[in-house]
Image (cartoon, grey):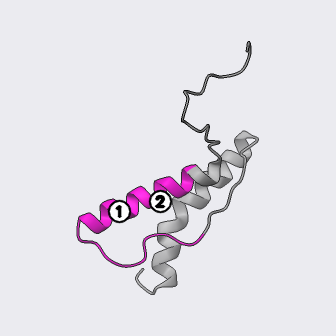
Amino acid sequence: MIGRPHTPKGHRRVAFSLGRIVGALKSSAANQCRKAGLDGKLWQRGYYEHVIRSVQDYRETWEYIDGNPARWLDKHGLS
């Protein structure tokens, strides 16, 4: 058929959603940490998905991410 992607016989096509990609990244990183001897909780459950639609939105998101380590230290009384 013209216009349909070819899938080899015996293989399934897999849809890669953002959730599946994030899950795979978290799993891979956690496995590498365990192999390196690190223990404990590595990731929070779930994630917040947001599409950045403007330069201003990008700046606000970057400032939030950039400030996360300091907020974590403050929250845990380590600052």
Residue 75, placed above or below residue 5: below
Is 39 colored magenta in this rendering?
yes
| Picture residue at 49% right of the left edge, 75% below the top | 72
**Depth check, front residue: 75 or 46:** 46
- Quadrant holding the C terminus: bottom left
Q: Amino acid at mark 1?
A: Asn
Q: Which residue carries the number 2 mark? A: 26
- Taking the view exactly as shown, the residue that stands out farthest to the front is 10
- Taking the view exactly as shown, the residue that stands out farthest to the bottom is 77
Q: Secondary structure at mark 1?
A: helix
| Picture residue at 30% right of the left edge, 68% below the top | 34
Q: Quadrant of residue 45?
A: bottom right
Q: Which residue carries the number 1 mark? A: 31
Residue 45, placed above or below residue 58: below
Q: Which residues are magenta?
A: 21-45
Label 1 crowding class (10 Å Cα cut-off): few <14, some 14-19, many 20+? few
Task: List x then y, in percent, for residue 63.
Answer: 59, 56
Label 2 crowding class (10 Å Cα cut-off): few <14, some 14-19, many 20+? some
**Depth check, front residue: 8 or 23:** 8
